[in-house]
């Protein structure tokens, strides 16, 4: 129920690290680009990851690019999701979810947002029966981060145990991964990091899903 296109996965870590730096430097001269690529390659230990999937979402109104990157480090998986809104739309929240059946019911969610008072929240959620996802979560997460860069670029990072949640991850086994986002609306935004979610906060910017075989 979304229009998306996967256009990258599983490249070499060093090449990807150089690419991610170079794309920020298209307005500079070649010499400066080469210096930046060399610096990126020197820092590859910090920037390396094992897999990547990019979705281009064209469903109105949510034109955006979603970039999923992961590092497979059994017994955990490190994950970073970057959302870049084409229209620089400000978001209330965005989330990633795992579900072997591809739907919302039975999914393990990780949602990132900033409350009206400025608190940064990254929280696990579950949808055991029907939405909103207010069931007791079984997914454990750590080393969480959520941030907004210039314009409509947001990034969510976390580490999860492979065996955690309603949907554990097995190397090479396909898993449906869902993405969703809502446009900013301070009048209905969650007031804290444990607030019960309502349909007023539903994903009205985009929703999309893809299939990922996580591995190292």
Image: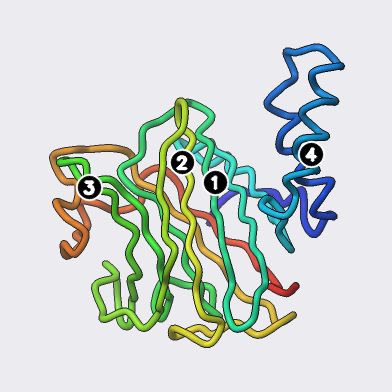
In space, the residues marked 3 and 1 are separated at their CA atoms by: 20 Å
Seen in the image, is 132 located left or right of residue 31? left
Residue that mark 2 sits on: 154
Quarter-wise, where is residue 174 in the image? bottom right
Comes first in the chain, label 4 or label 3: 4
Residue that mark 1 sits on: 82
- Residue lying at 41% horizontally and 43% vertically, measured from the top left: 147
In space, the residues marked 4 and 1 are separated at their CA atoms by: 17 Å
**SS assignment at label 3:** loop
Is 21 drawn above or below residue 34 in the view shown? below
Quarter-wise, where is residue 212 in the image? bottom right
**Mark 1–mark 2 CB contact (< 8 Å):** yes
Comes first in the chain, label 3 or label 2: 3
User: Closer to the camera, 179 or 37?
Assistant: 37
Comes first in the chain, label 3 or label 1: 1
Q: Nearer the viewer, mark 3 or mark 2?
A: 3
């Amino acid at each position: 129920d979304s229009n998306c296109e996967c256009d990258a996965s599983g490249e070499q870590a060093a090449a990807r690290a150089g690419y991610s730096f170079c794309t920020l430097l298209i307005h500079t001269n070649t010499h400066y680009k080469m210096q930046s690529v060399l610096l990126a390659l020197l820092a590859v230990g910090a920037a390396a990851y094992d897999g990547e999937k990019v979705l281009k979402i064209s469903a109105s109104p949510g034109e955006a690019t979603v970039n999923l990157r992961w590092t497979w480090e059994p017994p955990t998986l490190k994950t970073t999701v970057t959302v870049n809104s084409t229209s620089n739309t400000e978001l209330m929240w965005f989330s990633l979810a795992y579900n072997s059946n591809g739907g919302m019911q039975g999914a393990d969610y990780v949602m990132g947002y900033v409350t009206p008072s400025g608190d940064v929240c990254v929280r696990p959620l579950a949808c055991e029966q029907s939405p909103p996802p207010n069931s007791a979560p079984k997914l454990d997460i750590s080393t969480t981060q959520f941030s907004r860069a210039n314009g409509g670029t947001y990034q969510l990072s976390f580490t999860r145990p492979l065996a955690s949640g309603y949907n554990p991850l097995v190397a090479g086994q396909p898993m449906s991964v869902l993405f969703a986002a809502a446009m900013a609306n301070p009048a209905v935004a969650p007031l804290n990091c444990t607030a019960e979610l309502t349909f007023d906060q539903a994903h009205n910017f985009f929703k999309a899903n893809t299939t990922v075989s996580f591995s190292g």
